[in-house]
Image (cartoon, grey):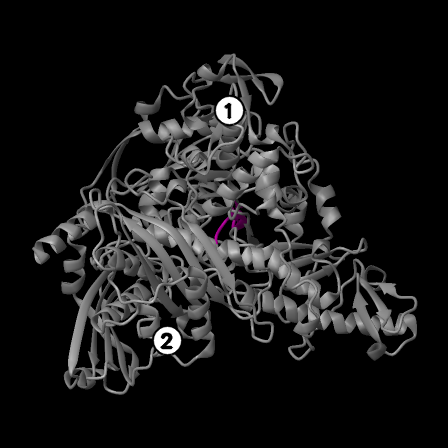
Amino acid sequence: MTIARRDLLKAGGAVIVSFAFRPTVRSAEAFALHSDADVIASQGSDGKPLDPASVDSFLAFHRDGTVTVYTGKVDVGTGLRVAVAQMAAEELGISPRQITVVDGDTGLCPDQGGTGGSTGLTRGGADVRQAAATARQALLALGATRLNHDAGDLTIADGEVRPRAGGAGATIASLIGDKRLAIAVDPKAPLRDPASYTSVGQPVPRPDVPAKCTGRHVYVHDFTLPGMLHARVIRPSSIGATLASVDEASIRGIPDVRVVRVGSFLAVVSSDEWAVVRAAAELKTTWSDAQTLPGSEGLERWTRSAAIDRDQAVVTRGDAPAAIAGAAKTMSATYFWPFQSHASLGPCCAVADIRDDGGTVWSSSQGTHGLRANLSKVFGLNPARVRVVFLDGSGSYGTNGGDHVAADAVLLSKTIAKPVRVQWSRQDETAWDPKGPQQLLDVRAGLDAAGAIVGWDTEMWLPAQAPGARALLAADAAGLAQDHGQGAGAITQNGDPPYACANARVLVHWIKETPLQLSNLRAPGKIANVFAVESFTDELAAAANADPIAFRLARLTDPRAIEVIRRTAQRFNWETRPSPRPRQAAGPLTGRGVAYMRYKQAENYVAIAMEVAVDPQSGRIAVSRVVCAHDCGLVVNPDALKNQIEGCILQTLSRALHEQVTFDRARVTSVDWASYPILRATESPAVDVILIERRDQPLLGAGEAATAPVAAALANAVFDASGVRLRTVPFTADRVKAALARASTDLG
Amino acid sequence: MASYAFRLNGRAVSADSWDPAQPLLYVLRNTFSLHGVKFGCGLGQCGACTVMLDGKAVRSCQTRIDRAAGHSVTTIEGLGTPASPHRVQAAFVAEQAAQCGYCTNGMVITAAALLAQTATPSDEQVKQSLAGNLCRCGTYTRILRAVTRAARA
């Protein structure tokens, strides 16, 4: 017997009493799935397979004709659920509206790896699709027996197996409803012909949006358990400091608050959330002095002179240094990208209910299976008895504080033997989320007399990655043994130009130390790398007195690359001429810039053009419009995809214009929206996205790619407008103003 | 423990609080299980916790329960339902103007308060009204379109 949706609804009905309003189906299901002790205790024991080799791990067919899809990949506001439903629906011959997706619950979903690197659909969706294609063949065989027809004469449409030629059919529900197929996924099961798609390629509305717009969507922040306590963790005053003393009398005026201390791990706990918020702010503590950081002032110099762990050539084509040495003309430039935060709008939250050596954790982690393994190892739990249930969080864009807060909740629940909800403060989320690293790039190129690029050499200074899990703050504070891995993702990709160039090298200098803990932040490394490569390409074009688009097109042969650039130029009404624009009369300086890249040099093709105005008085940059042509092969849901691309563009404008983690010798000092500002609605440009749909091509993940060309297009537009080349992010008004002043002095 | 009476989504309610300075945010979320209102910063900087107080958009993280007493509070749940949404909510759904949706509460409430005061705002007025509501996913273009759509509805 599978865990059917309505049984779960029934099971959970008594647990949560909502004030005045009925929860939505998803929220009811979330409560039911996650709050009924019997359901939790029976997970696994009811026999639902979790092995990715089994069709039943991914699909459950119910008697009412609905289907539940289980995937280990999670929807972090990206529309993954609707896209996976469309992919499954297409193979099964049902409507995606008949499908409910359960994502990231380690008790119900197969492990498909974490949700990162834009693999949500390429791996997560593709696995589900193959399971559904296998199920289709099984359903056709069941239908053949029931209808006394050759399976080859049958098809599935509208949830029914029926003869192609017409006549009576049998519903999927009547063939398999509430029973398991008990078959292995057939990697060779034929997929539907894209030419006949009816579901994939349609802008099916996301099922979560109505609940989000009416306040009914259940986030991990909203999840409650009977007897649950609220907690706030008091983090050290400096990174690496140890707790010297706690003055519990300092919070005596706040009722019913308990102080929990495990080594240097310190928290306040109460049934009343406001009591712990106040107690965390008012509890008097003393910490050891720790001054371990280099400070963010001068971080570029620090990065260049830091001790090197090892050098690694990640791209070697021909002999770039020799080609540059022998070139008629050489150019070079240095680019710098600072540490940045995920800066999730909602500080991260988790609920844990740990008893003995097992229990359940509710988390918005992008990698619930990996989190289960690490939490079990670090806190001495039996992984077979630990379930991590995904619930939506505030957008995370990689690994934000979500895994850390889950560890906080587990340690507290284990220590006090009660269900515990922990939510971080704004200041802790912005200061303590693991960060996207700083990136320093030196780029050199050699050109021959005709202007051809004969050699390209990129040197990168990046923090060394160390194997093992990322250290959990709670475990370090509590003095527990654990891994101290450092991982920021595939941060060296897209460091070489996508243009014709016989000799190219990308050399990485891996720095031994990182001041701040690292993690993958959307499109890891590639935004800064493309910023350098595409800014430098623009510098080469300007030096050659060539139009930036013509310069690029002359060095590309891939028709898909050429098409995204041409379509962008056309929609933008690109004016063909070299940059910078001839000097303008007084008033805002306007200009346009372009950038192109192919993600990871192997996936999506994206071109972006944008128009900016630079106010010479204030140095403020205003982006007025953006055009983006995007080719990610097969498009599953064009509207959800456009939403992602628009978000990629706006979020990266924010990162390029405003964002920089600051820190002194002891601690991060950018801790809220005043000290770590992000883009506002008032700065939002008009964004025009052109989707180039290719049904004959494999689909490619699209949650990140459109971020990568944004900063370069922006810098190139500022150069076009003002003649000033910005090579250090963020492009704050002060920095731009100073650059404009320097340029006018140079000219003067 | 003092008791504070106010109107909540059209009904007379009262809530107990040991602290008169307790922000309305926590009372709504924890006493009344109205989870649509979100904690974002507790500093009045992001707008995720916005509710209507006597029809005006206010930050519930900066509104003490003793100041809310005697007034009328409307939350996003009281504005409309999935089956019967407020025109702003319907416009947000039509434009699919959400990604993670954590900011959506504040965006919807702020826009509804704007349209209650200014029936046909200019694009610049819409932008300015949302200047204090942050969206990290970068959904501003859709949000602005949705508010304009709602104004025309």
Q: Is residue A483 left or right of residue A700?
A: left
| Percent of width and height locating residue A381 | 49, 53
Report in which chain the residue with disc 1 lies. B
Q: Is residue B1 above or below residue A297?
A: above
| Percent of width and height locating residue A284 | 27, 29
| Percent of width and height locating residue B100 | 51, 47
User: Within 10 Å of the Cα at label 2, are there few (<14), some (14-19), or many (20+) other Cα atoms?
Assistant: some
Q: CA distance from mark 2 to mark 1?
A: 52 Å
Which amino acid type is marked by label 2?
Leu
Range of residues picked out in magenta: A354-365
Query: Which element carries disc 1, helix, strand or loop?
Result: helix
Residue under circle 1?
Answer: B117
Q: Is residue A360 magenta?
A: yes
Query: Which numbered circle lies on residue A110?
Result: none
Q: Is residue A188 magenta?
A: no
Q: Is residue A343 left or right of residue B89?
A: left
Residue under circle 2?
Answer: A553
Q: Residue at x 28, y 40 (%)?
A: A675
